Image (cartoon, coloured by chain):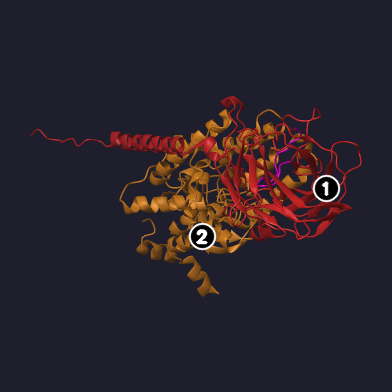
Amino acid sequence: MSKLRDAVNNVDLKRFRFWFQLAAFVLFVYGGYLAINLGNSLPMFSCGYIRDGRAGVCYLLPLQHQLARPWPQLFSYAGVAVLTGFAIFALWFIVLNKGWCGFVCPLGTLQDWLTSLRQKLGIRQSGYTHEQFRRLTWIKYVLLALLLLIPLGIGGGLWSHEVGAPFCQICPGRMVLPLFVGDFSQWTIDFSSPGKIVLTALGMGITGLFIVGAFVKKRFFCFFCPMSALHYLLSKPALLRLRKDGSKCTRCGDCYTACDMEIREIADDVTRKEIMTDDCTLCLKCVAACPEKGALKVDFANITFFESTEEGFIKRMNKGIRK
Amino acid sequence: MRGGGDGVLWLSDQAPRRDGGGRPGGARGGMAGMGGMAGMDDSGMGGAPGRIPNKRLWLRSGSNPLTAGSVPASEPVLLLDAQQQASSIDVEAHGGPYNVTFPMPEPGVYNAYFVRRAVDQETLAVTVAKAEVMRSAGHSKVEGEAQLMVPRTDSRVPVEIVRERKDGEGLFTRINYGDTIRFQVLRDGKPVQNARVSFTSGQGWSNSVQSDEDGRAGFVVIRDYFPEWREFDRRHRETFVVSASFPVDQAGEWQGSPYHSVRYTTTLAGAYYPAIEDYESYAWGLGIAVVALLFSGTAVYLYRRRRVRPYREVSFDE
């Protein structure tokens, strides 16, 4: 048992993540061709606009459609469908917590691949200042609120159905992910109504920004992702958890340096045990980068299965964990 | 040329107007459109879960959808449901325009046939009005959808038009402006050569061709919807009517009346919609993405350049 634990703690996380992410990407982008269908309440960007290849649909798409139902329906029988969809989403989410972002989300994986490309080209990365970080971190909550309120407004007759599923219209995943099955049909501006023009133009602009942003900044889009905000609101009962023992932390800052999301609390906060913040993607790089035994650990249903160790740190350092 | 009022019978899911013509009313969107017809009655899509959607079809007269009115009739409709089970649907006895209603419990293609035979001036007129109605499962794929989409015929129907499917067509696929749609005219299941096949668009434009040796005829769906931009509706639905007619030298007797020839006429109606090319632009999409990419890329580059401190030599004056 201790050998198994040592093997897990000494794992080459970078390689493990690469293969895990690749497998998840193939599953959710091409799984539909093998008749795999995991439903339409998935807690990550398995894009519904991948028509045939998708193995499931990101929950935000059906959620927006459901909330746009006329209010008399929404607050009667259609409300059951909303609650059912949300319950299934929550069940999926509870298993992996924000690990869906760090290990499964195809759009997140794509950003990691762009980061790898940048590193191979020898171009340095960009980062936010602490002040920029503090200001920008609210954007995902604003997007989440708009994502919920605009469809509700449509259902109430305040806006036209033309702006239905507004977040999907501006999400770069709609444009980028279908490319992997050879579908370029989303790269258009829809001139059928003023609302469509604005949203599709915004979507194309954000896609251009996404490509540059994800190239120069690790996990650029995750910082603004409303799914990430929704995750955090539900993360309390999740089974997969990131925990910190502040008494073992020397505040060396290795975890902060390794963090794609530049979360300062991971290094600075030595009082909280539940150290996962709303921006965290549970990529577990911080655990892998920590040299102090047991300072950072990952629990599943309160059972620790991966924790920081000196031996693991040295092994990973020798392989170049921060390449 | 404009299609005229010629007494051609066809089945429509849109009720004729009370004044006997004009633009049909009662259209409801949401139905998988191709060759099928939009609109369900009140228990249809968008209704409460668990309720079986119903479909209502009206018999209309005149190949021009713009002016086709209602026509009295009493014949039942032969229905071939999604599972290929046949049943007879009686006309609703309410005194209004001829219409029949049938349930559509399963996703798939439902074929409805109105068949009329009458002898006039020693010629037996056999008229078959066919409707091909599709029920989809929203945007979701239906298991075995490709199989469900295979066009079907029925041996009890003397003559019919079969619409050939587009590549990869599903229950949610639509016919759009610019598409070429092909039909096959069959009599007793066999192709009919040299039948006169006419296509009439929703605005009454029509074209006629002769069917080839395989009974096939094709038409390009023209765009006949030119609203002001602010009134443009990407879901705008028009109805086309395809009719085929041909004579056959055949003598016999029908209900005590002798005849020396038979005139077959068959129709099939369907719906078509604006093409994506009518309202979406790749050039603008790519243009905006490239501008955003170049702008943000340049901004990042310049920002980084500005933050690079120039080399300054420090010399000590000894």
Rendered view: B129 above or below A297: above
Quarter of the rendering containing residue B38 = top right
Q: Is residue B134 left or right of residue A123?
A: right
Name the mark nearer the viewer: 1 or 2: 1
Can residue B38 be found in the magenta stretch? Answer: yes
Q: Amino acid at mark 1?
A: Val
Question: In which quadrant is the C terminus of chain A drawn?
Answer: bottom left
Dot 2 alpha-carbon crowd within 10 angstroms: few under 14, some 14 to 19, many 20 or more: some
Name the foreground residue: A3 vs A246: A3
- Label 2: which residue? A26
- Give the left or right position of residue A266, taking residue B307 as reference: right
At x 47%, y 52%, the residue is A182
Give the labeled residue for mark 1: B119
Residue A183 visible in the picture = yes
Which structural element holds mark 2? helix
- Report which colour depicts chain A: orange
Q: Chain of mark 1?
A: B
Residue A315 coordinates in the image, percent (x, y): 39, 66
Q: Real-space Cα distance between discs 1 and 2? A: 65 Å
Q: Main secondary structure of the magenta part?
A: loop
Assess disc 1: are there few (<14), some (14-19) or many (≥20) residues with their C-alpha within 10 Å of its C-alpha. Answer: many
Residue B52 visible, this orientation: no
Instruction: Locate residue B25 relative to residue B318 in the image: left or right.
Output: right
Check the residue under mark 2 and report the chain it is in.
Answer: A
